[in-house]
Image (cartoon, coloured by chain):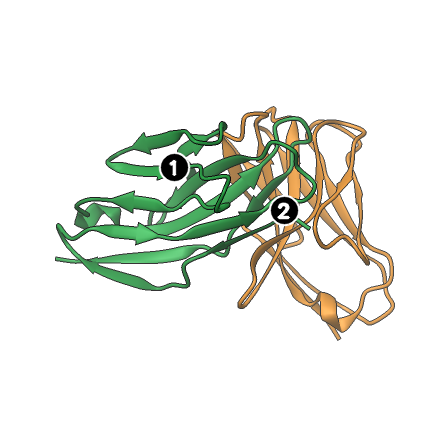
Amino acid sequence: EAAVTQSPRNKVAVTGGKVTLSCNQTNNHNNMYWYRQDTGHGLRLIHYSYGAGSTEKGDIPDGYKASRPSQENFSLILELATPSQTSVYFCASGDRQHTEVFFGKGTRLTVV
Amino acid sequence: GDSVTQTEGPVTVSESESLIINCTYSATSIAYPNLFWYVRYPGEGLQLLLKVITAGQKGSSRGFEATYNKETTSFHLQKASVQESDSAVYYCALGDYNQGKLIFGQGTKLSIKP
């Protein structure tokens, strides 16, 4: 069964702290994505990857880094978290033709 | 940057009536964008409804159709006669096979009145 697993599911972080959101997929997909979802904005692309070792900037990459050490894993890193990064973050994996796209259940991040 | 804008939801349509959900896009970093409509039925994951990779072409699936219009940068989703089973959230998306980039619109929740 296709699966995208995110951890943690909920996180409270302090301003200026480092936060790492992890994502694992068992779909053997080349592409992986990190989006954030805020009211009125829908899904906004932060970083994506088309294979192990690659990371590409999406539309709102400022303040975020990404890491794709393997086909299965894709992390999102906030080196210095700010309250404006409070949001729900979704990881997704997809095939090259975008025919299959599977989303994780989301991580609710609150930066105080 | 690249972006997708679609009809603000929620949208309610009576059964057997026609439907149009508007989608317009901006592709500044993708030379040859591919366009998609995805759907999420209640309790299910996101699934591809239709896709078009060539400007001027029309895609169709399950009675829905959308035409890739490069001049107006639009990809509106239409159906002549909706059914109750079409109740779902619909997402327009813009992608690039070469880079792997995939951008979604904000989603449009569609409810069908019996």
Q: Which residue is mark 2?
A: A6
Chain A drawn in what color?
Answer: orange
Identify the residue under disc 1: B67
Whether labels 1 and 2 belong to a single chain: the reply is no
The spot of residue A43 in percent (x, y) is 57, 54
Q: Which chain is green?
A: B
Query: Which quarter of the rendering shows the C terminus of chain A?
Result: bottom right
Count up the numbered dots. Answer: 2
| B104 on left or right of B86 | right
* Towards the viewer: A43 or B64: B64
User: What amino acid is found at the position of numbered circle 2 in the picture?
Assistant: Gln
As drawn, the residue found furthest toward the bottom would be A112
Element type at marker 1? strand
Chain letter of the residue beneath label 1 in the structure image: B
From this view, report whether residue B50 is shown above or below residue A62. above
A78 vs A21, left or right, is: right
* Callout 1 amino acid: Thr
Question: Which residue corresponds to the image point at 44% horizontal and 50% vertical from the top-left?
Answer: B23
Q: Answer yes or no: is residue A32 visible.
A: yes
Q: CA distance from mark 1 to mark 2?
A: 35 Å
